[in-house]
Image (cartoon, coloured by chain):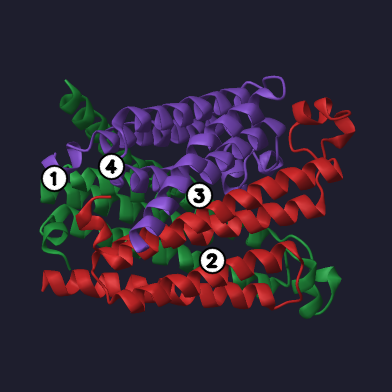
Chain colours: A red, B green, C purple
Amino acid sequence: MPANMMENEAFTAFIFYGTLLVLKMYAVAIITGQVRLRKKAFANPEDALRRGGLQYHREDPDVERCLRAHRNDMENIYPFLFLGAVYSLLEPNPAVARIHFLVFFCGRITHTAAYLLKLRAPTRSVSYSIAQLPCFSMAAQILFGVIRHWC
Amino acid sequence: MPANMMENEAFTAFIFYGTLLVLKMYAVAIITGQVRLRKKAFANPEDALRRGGLQYHREDPDVERCLRAHRNDMENIYPFLFLGAVYSLLEPNPAVARIHFLVFFCGRITHTAAYLLKLRAPTRSVSYSIAQLPCFSMAAQILFGVIRHWC
Amino acid sequence: MPANMMENEAFTAFIFYGTLLVLKMYAVAIITGQVRLRKKAFANPEDALRRGGLQYHREDPDVERCLRAHRNDMENIYPFLFLGAVYSLLEPNPAVARIHFLVFFCGRITHTAAYLLKLRAPTRSVSYSIAQLPCFSMAAQILFGVIRHWC
């Protein structure tokens, strides 16, 4: 690895958690496919035809749930990949940075578990809110860093 | 901030507008939640149960509108975060770069306002198209930069 | 272009294919708009009103298909933009890196063609799976790189 990037401890921690979260999203996609096969509910007629007939071209509440979990990941994990990268470039205190990433990581893992396992409300929305805290913190630090640089 | 990155004025402007747009997306998510509570329309039965009963596990046109606005942001703001970062690395003229980012930023803010406030067509689609112009320009400059480097 | 970034041949190949894939996603968005106009199926009442009346505020299977293709791109191309960038920073063998990006690129182009042209199953899901292989490979190399750095 190029010394300059890996010397930045915050950046190293960021790419570690960011990659794990991308893999977690891939896992949700794979689970969605498994649920489609198990419940025989396909979004495309060509898939249904291959799996028994057009009657399986239909919606299913468990498939919809997986799709909502995946969509929520796209709404939140992708912005983290941007904010976390830029925040790491600000050379934050590595321990503080690691706490930011870890809180987000745990919040999003819990969010997915709460979604797919249908945990009682408000488990899912509390996980979502906790994961947003480091994101707002990173966004604020980025904006202050830029404004300070401009002044 | 590391001198090398912040010396790049285009990059500094990019992370400023990029972060503001991510915060704008978070605002749409928060508004969606508020509309769900106000209209009593929840995507998950466990949320509906907590808010009065399963009859509130239902769709609502205003919630759907928020979801479409958010989705359109994902379709357009995320690619900007990629194109803008790479374009900034090409060391463009800082003033020209700032115009690219500002046009995109204003286009997307107007797009969200037009969507959520149900402004008359074609306000929303015109905002969308204007915001795409700097994206196509950045994509073209990236491709030309790479091809020139390869030749 | 800054010498340091462009000297990294893997990174140059990455931004080339990444930008082409973003343009491909824009093409899907444009096709969606054309299908909406041709089939007269608009997601928003204000658009329908401008195009002939509220009866055209409706869903259409071909529009839904475009939306699913676009969503699948968001689920897969955005993570590639993260993984590919970080993987390139690991200074991989340029030829090996180029194969990773090319497999992903061809897989996603085929995926979109299979989706929009309604090719027989399992063309679409095979393309999706092939495109995931370099992503899992890059994710594994990133994680091993970080862990090796930590040990």
Between marks 1 and 3 in the image, the one whose residue lies nearer the viewer: 1
Mark 2 or mark 3, earlier in chain: 2
What label sits on residue B29 in the rendered view? Answer: 2
Alpha carbon of mark 4 to alpha carbon of mark 1: how far?
Answer: 22 Å
Count the marks.
4
Instruction: Say what amino acid the circle numbered 1 marks.
Output: Glu
Closer to us: B139 or A37: A37
Instruction: Say what amino acid the circle numbered 3 marks.
Output: Asn
Specify few, some or many for label 3: CA neighbours under 10 Å numbering under 14, 14-19, or 20 or more: some
Alpha carbon of mark 3 to alpha carbon of mark 4: how far?
Answer: 35 Å
Closer to us: B110 or C97: C97
Q: Report x, y in % for residue C39.
A: 65, 29
C1 relative to A117, above or below: above
Secondary structure under tag 1 reads loop
Report the residue marked by disc 3.
B72
A12 left or right of C9 in image: right
C6 left or right of C43 in image: left
- The quarter of the picture where residue A111 lies is bottom right
Residue B59 in view (yes/no):
yes
Report the residue marked by disc 4.
C91
| Discs 1 and 3 share one subunit | yes
